[in-house]
Image: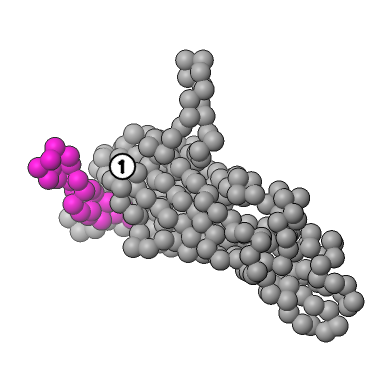
Amino acid sequence: MLDIIDKGRRVRIYTQMNDIGDPKNNQLLFPAKVASKLNLTTKQMHRRLIDLLLRVKRFEVYDPDYTVVQDKAYQQWGPEEADIRIDCLVTDARQKVIDIRPYRKVRTQVKVSLHMVNVLTGAILFDSDVAVEGVWGDVQGQGTLIPPNVPLESESVQTSLGGDYERALTKAFDAAVERIDQIMRPVGRVTFVAGNSISMFGGIQHGFQGGDEIVVFRAHRKDMGDGYERLIGVQPIARARCDGVGSDLSQCTVLRIEPSQQPMDGDYAVLTDESARGMRNR
């Protein structure tokens, strides 16, 4: 992803939702007509996933329905324009009735798989798909509660079950977006060094926040004989803290420098593990 920060733009993600599960399967307790009434369609849930990705504020997110206006004509924005393509699929969805006499309670579980591909190289980003799940009904106050003598097939219960499925799916999407945000770590580029002060292209819209700690590193590239330079290694140079973070630029203070090294213009910076695991603003 170093080429992206070199171009001064954000990561472009193209998303496609392949399936959200079929309410007609025997693992879900509400019928297709309830799903239709609640607008639990693949398209609508895909929109929910896109909105959650956009909430991260450092990705440009597109889908098969996205169009742009150019030369007074609408043109569709295809996956070939993206950096990362994400295919999302609900792999399992089920609801279970739990007896908590005199009531009955429903637990809903939805599993989601994300297939992520580098569009430029065609390579899968990870050894396997990113798998997450969302559960609704494990804690008090969650899950449809069915009073005694009220049938599972009643309209109010069926509508509530559909709502449970939507909440579980949304929780799975939340977990998926969190994983994507953690995996695709914010990257910046050093533009100026003076003493223990570093200026970096990379700010709020690239995912950095005030107080973040970064690792400054040097990228080593080599022409492999096909006319293209490829990354062959990275060298840690220093550790720094982002004291002032703007929209595009950040001012950082060097905390530690590797022996015999010195940060310089053209180096890169990536968010540390500790900052990535900390609380991130949304």
Residue 14 visible in the displayed image: yes
Position of 175 compared to 223: left or right? right
Query: Which is nearer the eye, 133 or 57?
Result: 133
Q: Residue furthest right?
A: 149
The residue located at (74%, 69%) in the rendering is: 143
Residue 25 image position (x, y, % from top left) = 63, 65
Which contiguous range is marked in magenta?
A: 216-240
- Looking at the rendered image, the quarter that the N terminus falls into is top left
The residue located at (53%, 49%) in the rendering is: 17
Would residue 252 be counted in the magenta stretch? Answer: no
Would residue 235 be counted in the magenta stretch? Answer: yes
Residue 218 image position (x, y, % from top left) = 23, 49
Residue 252 image position (x, y, % from top left) = 40, 46
Residue 87 image position (x, y, % from top left) = 46, 51
Query: Which is nearer the eye, 202 or 104?
Result: 104
The residue located at (52%, 22%) in the rendering is: 74
Secondary structure under badge 1? loop
- The residue identified by callout 1 is 120
Main secondary structure of the magenta stretch: strand
Q: Amino acid at mark 1?
A: Leu
